[in-house]
């Protein structure tokens, strides 16, 4: 049945059929009518709405100005050819290899993989749509071949430069020159042209004003790639190339409709819609951005207008109104971000990206270049519980397990020291403590050892399943101090998953997106069970102790605005005081607040010590201070006072003890706040005191009494001590 003759005959038959089909296609497909000015007129503003349907913002009018190719300096033209299509002046309008790969990937459902020539990109922008279908791809090939025969290379390049999207609502190179460098296109330098050419690959990711550290590294690498290609093609002198410096763009111009928090919300909404278009239709980032910006979308957000207003007010009253950069330089370096999520639906109901979009374009709610510090400790406990991990002596880890809380205690693994001995905040020795107390007091030495007991690979795996981006992070002991980068959006998702009893929550801003008769369905924010309910609920139970008897006690438990809300949460303060956090939740709402020290002019991470000039003690900014105060001022005005945690666990501070302490008992440690035997000030469950001795046998392993007294009073907040920064911390 299968001889070589038959196989070859079939193969050549298909080839002839394909060639014949392409000839027919070439004959029947004509170049459509197209005009860049008409195309610009068709572009429409997007409308963004609150969850109740009222209008939040409209983006500005489309920014496009058509220019003749003669107005574009030759060296600047060459930067785009060097970036996108080095064979542009020699090819016939298509890249056969790249096109074949693109068609195959489209058929295989893998999305766009690049390979398009400048001619093909011009045809797609000018005559066709951005959709990734075999039919559209074949049309693109045929039209590109015909366009290359009928138009000069300069005409094609002019069309490409006038129709490309550069971000900042700028269509075409003239609009881009103004948006990024405040000059007309004829005044662009080679360096500036190389940046604009590099920008086309991913405009929002590579926009210097909003780019992450990774984004900045990537666009600089592509800028170098463009210039090196120009040298290779003898379009640029190697000596001049060596002396060129990266041309940092100007800040974006203020645009109506994006002031205050609106710009942060619009940017994140656009990004979510672009991500979905990339997933559904196989678009590149650049193609997706061009399909979203100025394309007449009506985008409804999950933002609750009341909660959004309350979060903005809380940040203003608790922090920004107290900052005075003219009196204190450090006050100008304080950035705050926050995200509030409904744990049952995954909806982002409020978001705070910074004081004002036009004062700080990069959203502090989504930036992930600062350490989450001790807000990572619950992840370590979750990993221990999920994996039923044991201590070095074989005891199963629970909220009542005893650990040595001595500061700088060397971490051990199977009797061997692993070369890691982190100090506790202020170098306090706690002696033997329970896991519950270690979480309440945020004891670094305990969680460093617990991470090794669990296995750092399992800790990082659990972090990933809970929603943290740890793909490129090393599974090393230093990560127990929260030295990786994370955003308030990311941490809100992690804690929302805990609040949702272990079912994955991916915080989502966009509720729906419609364009004429087209509707894009957003993915369900609620996913599968990523850790067991018992593990998640036990972590929640333990975290109630941080509020009622730990580092968040003053700002949260004793806050006069609290009206009986049950609260779980964790503070965090990174090394050198560069970030401070409080991420906490009630049964019905999760909110993560982060404070970041960012030097205003350079963008470098700096210590926030001395901010507002009113901080007690050593003047350090910690998680139990401003972040917890903002959190409480917001949450206690919008949460259900009657909601209760439905916990499936027998462990942690939220579980009523099975014994009653005697009245003569006194806690061994001397905390900075009232002793743990004090009754709660609200309806929230009391904290189970780790230092008391039960008068009868409890149903679970009892808490033991610490064997030694700390050398000083425990600090009012936690924080990773001043140790050399981890290479993965971004510092």
Image: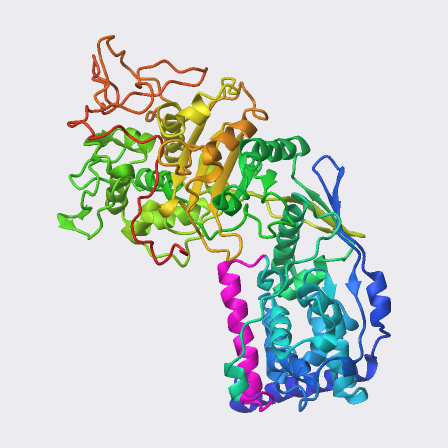
Q: Quadrant of residue 531?
A: top left
Specify whether 577 is left or right of 50.
Answer: left
Specify whether 232 is left or right of 722.
Answer: right
Q: Residue furthest front?
A: 327
Name the residue rendered at 20%, 29% in the picture. 710
Q: Is residue 531 above or below residue 100?
A: above
Q: Nearer the viewer, residue 232 or 656?
A: 232
Q: How is the image coloured?
A: rainbow
In the rendered image, which quarter contains the C terminus? bottom left
Q: Nearer the viewer, residue 494 or 320?
A: 320
Name the residue rendered at 25%, 8% in the picture. 663
The region drawn magenta spans 210-237
Residue 637, position in %: x, y?
A: 58, 24
Residue 400, position in %: x, y?
A: 26, 28
Q: Is residue 133 above or below residue 437?
A: below
Name the residue rendered at 17%, 42% in the picture. 392
Q: Is 14 a magenta residue?
A: no
Residue 592, position in %: x, y?
A: 50, 38
Number of numbered discs? 0
Specify whether 201 is left or right of 214.
Answer: right
Q: Nearer the viewer, residue 426 or 664?
A: 426
Residue 627, position in %: x, y?
A: 48, 35
Is residue 143 in view from this perspective? no
Q: Is 235 a magenta residue?
A: yes
Q: Quadrant of residue 123?
A: bottom right
Q: Is residue 641 above or below residue 80?
A: above
Q: Nearer the viewer, residue 201 or 539?
A: 201
């Amino acid at each position: 049945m299968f001889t070589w003759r038959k196989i070859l005959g079939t193969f050549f038959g298909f080839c002839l059929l394909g060639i014949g089909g392409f000839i027919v296609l070439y004959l029947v497909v004509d170049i459509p009518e197209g005009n860049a000015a008409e195309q610009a007129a068709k572009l429409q503003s997007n409308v963004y709405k609150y969850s109740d349907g009222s209008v939040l913002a409209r983006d500005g009018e489309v920014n496009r100005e058509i220019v003749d190719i003669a107005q574009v300096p030759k060296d600047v033209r060459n930067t785009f050819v060097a970036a996108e299509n080095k064979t542009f002046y020699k090819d016939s309008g298509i890249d056969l290899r790249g096109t074949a790969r693109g068609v195959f990937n489209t058929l295989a459902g893998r999305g766009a993989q690049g390979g398009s020539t400048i001619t093909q990109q011009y045809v797609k922008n000018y005559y066709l749509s951005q959709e990734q279908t075999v039919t559209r791809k074949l049309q693109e090939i045929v039209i590109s071949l015909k366009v290359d025969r009928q138009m000069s290379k300069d005409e094609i390049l002019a069309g490409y430069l006038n129709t490309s999207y550069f971000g900042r609502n700028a269509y075409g190179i003239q609009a881009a020159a103004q948006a990024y460098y405040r000059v007309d296109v004829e005044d662009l330098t080679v360096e500036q042209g190389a940046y604009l050419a590099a920008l086309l690959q991913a405009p929002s990711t590579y926009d210097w004003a909003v780019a992450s550290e990774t984004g900045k590294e990537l666009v600089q690498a592509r800028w170098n790639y463009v210039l090196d290609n120009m040298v290779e093609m003898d379009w640029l002198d190697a000596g001049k190339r060596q002396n060129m410096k990266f041309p940092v763009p100007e800040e974006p111009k203020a645009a109506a409709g994006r002031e205050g928090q609106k710009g942060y919300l619009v940017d994140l909404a656009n990004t979510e819609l672009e991500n979905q278009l990339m997933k559904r239709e196989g678009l590149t980032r650049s193609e997706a951005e061009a399909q979203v910006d100025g394309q007449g979308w009506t985008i409804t957000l999950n933002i609750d207008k009341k909660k959004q207003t309350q979060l903005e007010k809380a940040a203003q009253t608790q922090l920004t109104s107290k900052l005075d950069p003219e009196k204190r330089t450090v006050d100008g370096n304080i950035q705050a971000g926050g995200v509030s999520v409904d744990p049952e639906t995954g909806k982002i109901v409020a978001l705070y990206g910074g004081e004002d979009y036009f004062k700080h374009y990069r959203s502090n709610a989504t930036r992930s270049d600062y350490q989450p510090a001790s807000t990572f400790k619950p992840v370590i406990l979750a990993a221990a519980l999920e994996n039923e991990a044991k201590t070095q002596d074989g005891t199963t880890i629970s909220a009542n397990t005893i650990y040595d809380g001595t500061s700088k205690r060397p971490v051990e693994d199977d009797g061997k020291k692993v070369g890691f001995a982190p100090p506790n905040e202020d170098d306090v020795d706690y002696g033997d403590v329970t896991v519950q107390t270690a979480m309440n007091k945020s004891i670094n030495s305990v969680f460093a050892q617990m991470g090794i007991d669990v296995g750092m690979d399992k800790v990082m795996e659990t972090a990933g399943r809970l929603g943290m981006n740890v793909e490129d992070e090393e599974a090393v002991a230093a990560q127990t101090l929260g030295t990786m980068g994370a955003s308030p959006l990311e941490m809100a998702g992690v804690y929302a998953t805990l609040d949702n009893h272990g079912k994955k929550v991916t915080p989502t801003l966009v509720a729906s997106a419609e364009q004429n008769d087209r509707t894009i369905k957003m993915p369900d924010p609620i996913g599968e069970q990523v850790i067991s309910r018992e593990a998640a609920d036990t972590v929640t139970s333990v975290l109630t102790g941080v509020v009622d008897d730990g580092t968040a006690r003053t700002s949260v438990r004793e806050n006069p605005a609290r009206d009986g809300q049950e609260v779980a949460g964790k503070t965090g303060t990174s090394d050198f005081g560069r970030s401070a956090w409080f991420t906490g939740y009630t049964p019905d709402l999760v909110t993560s607040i982060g404070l970041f020290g960012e030097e205003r002019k350079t963008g470098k991470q700096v210590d926030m010590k001395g901010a507002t000039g009113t901080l007690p003690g050593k003047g350090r900014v910690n998680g139990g201070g401003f972040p917890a105060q903002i959190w409480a001022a917001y949450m206690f005005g919008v949460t259900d006072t009657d909601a209760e945690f439905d916990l499936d666990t027998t462990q942690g501070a939220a579980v009523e003890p099975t014994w009653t302490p005697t009245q003569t008992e006194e806690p061994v440690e001397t905390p900075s706040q009232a002793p743990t035997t004090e009754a709660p000030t609200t309806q929230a469950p009391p904290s189970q005191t780790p230092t008391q001795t039960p008068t009868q046998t409890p149903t679970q392993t009892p808490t033991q009494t610490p064997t030694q007294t700390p050398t000083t009073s425990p600090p009012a907040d936690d924080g990773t001590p001043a140790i050399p920064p981890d290479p993965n911390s971004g510092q």
